[in-house]
């Protein structure tokens, strides 16, 4: 009788625990979440809503005075600025097994090997990728003029499709820049940028490029961008402010009441 009572107690305990175990969620590998949408934005020509989760192959377009904050299941974050178009060309990731998290916002480092390839058709994006934990992991923003490899750094990439002008700026860490048709990688140091101007023939092929390196940061939106880094891109959850000092960045808008 005592054994039966013990078994009954164990079953009741399991039934009490089971719903939580069965309903426990884990972020699916190789997914992206639109954490916040400001203004108007579309994903494959349909309205993009905050909270939407999607996979590779999608194109996001923002309108005037609009921006989209994305969080990747590999821990990366991206802010798509106004009047921009970017495609998540490739996003593959090994299954997440070592770290179990319920939301994209909770991922603070790369949980498994991943390959992220985006194509900036035009406009501006701010991207941050954690130091890649797995050998062979990549996070790149590509354009017809060149590309930026982001690893443990924060980059601002601006591309003008009409002129072919590309600017890659490093707001934190070093960025690997690669110019189309060039065989060498350009290291972009923190707080500097490179400017690449491409000349194309009538078929659109690049015939020559001019490269300016180690240029000072010139984007007039830089203060707002730094604010986005501290307030939006690394808040947890999304409406909780994390001080930019945690990122070793200057705080453009100090909190007079840091303990509130």
Image (spheres, rainbow, N blue to C red):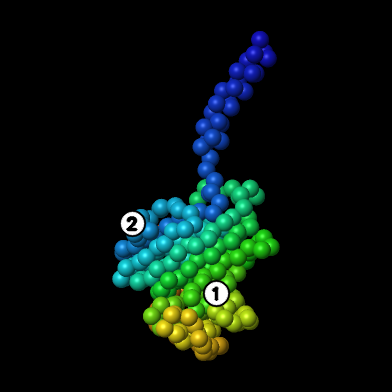
**Tag of residue 46:** 2
Which residue is rendered at x = 52% and y = 70% of the image?
A: 141
Q: Residues within 10 Å of mark 1 (few under 14, many from 20)?
A: many
Quarter placement of the C terminus: bottom left
Residue at image mark 1: 148
Which residue is rendered at x = 44% and y = 52% of the image?
A: 53
Which residue is rendered at x = 52% and y = 32% of the image?
A: 19
Quarter placement of the N terminus: top right
The correct choice, above or below, for 132 with respect to 107 in the image is below
Task: Tell me residue 104's x, y (percent).
Answer: 50, 54
Which of the pair 172/249 is nearer the observer?
172
Which of the pair 38/212 is nearer the observer?
212
Q: Secondary structure at mark 2?
A: strand
Which of the pair 212/255 is nearer the observer?
212
**Tag of residue 187:** none
In terms of image quadrants, where is residue 182?
bottom right
Q: Are marks 2 and 1 in contact (CB under 8 Å)?
A: no
Q: CA distance from mark 2 to mark 1?
A: 28 Å
Task: Tell me residue 199's x, y (percent).
Answer: 46, 87
In this view of the protein, can residue 165 be seen by the observer? no
The correct choice, above or below, for 180 with respect to 21 in the image is below
Left or right: 54 in relation to 129 = left
Q: Residue furthest front?
A: 203
Q: Earlier in the sequence, mark 2 or mark 1?
A: 2
Which of the pair 257/236 is nearer the observer?
236
Which residue is rendered at x = 51% and y = 37% of the image?
A: 23
In terms of image quadrants, where is residue 248?
bottom right
Q: Residues within 10 Å of mark 2 (few under 14, many from 20)?
A: few
How many marks can you see?
2
The correct choice, above or below, for 178 with respect to 6 in the image is below
Q: Secondary structure at mark 1?
A: strand
């Amino acid at each position: 009788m005592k054994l039966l009572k013990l078994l009954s107690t164990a079953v009741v305990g399991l039934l009490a625990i089971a719903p939580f175990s069965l309903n426990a969620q884990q972020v699916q590998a190789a997914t992206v979440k639109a954490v916040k949408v400001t203004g108007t934005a579309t994903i494959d020509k349909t309205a993009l809503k905050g909270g939407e989760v999607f996979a590779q192959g999608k194109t996001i377009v923002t309108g005037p005075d609009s921006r989209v904050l994305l969080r990747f299941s590999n821990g990366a974050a991206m802010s798509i600025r106004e009047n921009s178009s970017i495609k998540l060309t490739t996003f593959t990731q090994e299954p997440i097994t070592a770290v179990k998290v319920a939301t994209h916002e909770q991922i603070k480092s790369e949980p498994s090997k991943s390959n992220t390839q985006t194509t900036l058709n035009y406009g501006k994006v701010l991207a941050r990728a954690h130091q890649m934990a797995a050998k062979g992991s990549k996070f790149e923003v590509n354009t017809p003029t060149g590309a930026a490899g982001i690893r443990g750094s924060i980059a601002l990439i601006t591309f003008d499709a009409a002129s072919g002008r590309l600017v890659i700026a490093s707001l934190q860490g070093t960025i690997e820049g690669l110019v189309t048709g060039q065989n060498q990688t350009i290291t972009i140091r923190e707080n500097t940028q490179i400017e690449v101007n491409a000349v194309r023939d009538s078929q659109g092929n690049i015939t020559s490029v001019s490269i300016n390196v180690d240029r000072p940061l010139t984007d007039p939106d830089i203060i707002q961008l730094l604010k986005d880094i501290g307030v939006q891109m690394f808040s947890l959850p999304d409406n909780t402010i994390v001080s930019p000092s945690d990122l070793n960045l200057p705080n453009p808008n100090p909190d007079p009441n840091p303990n509130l």
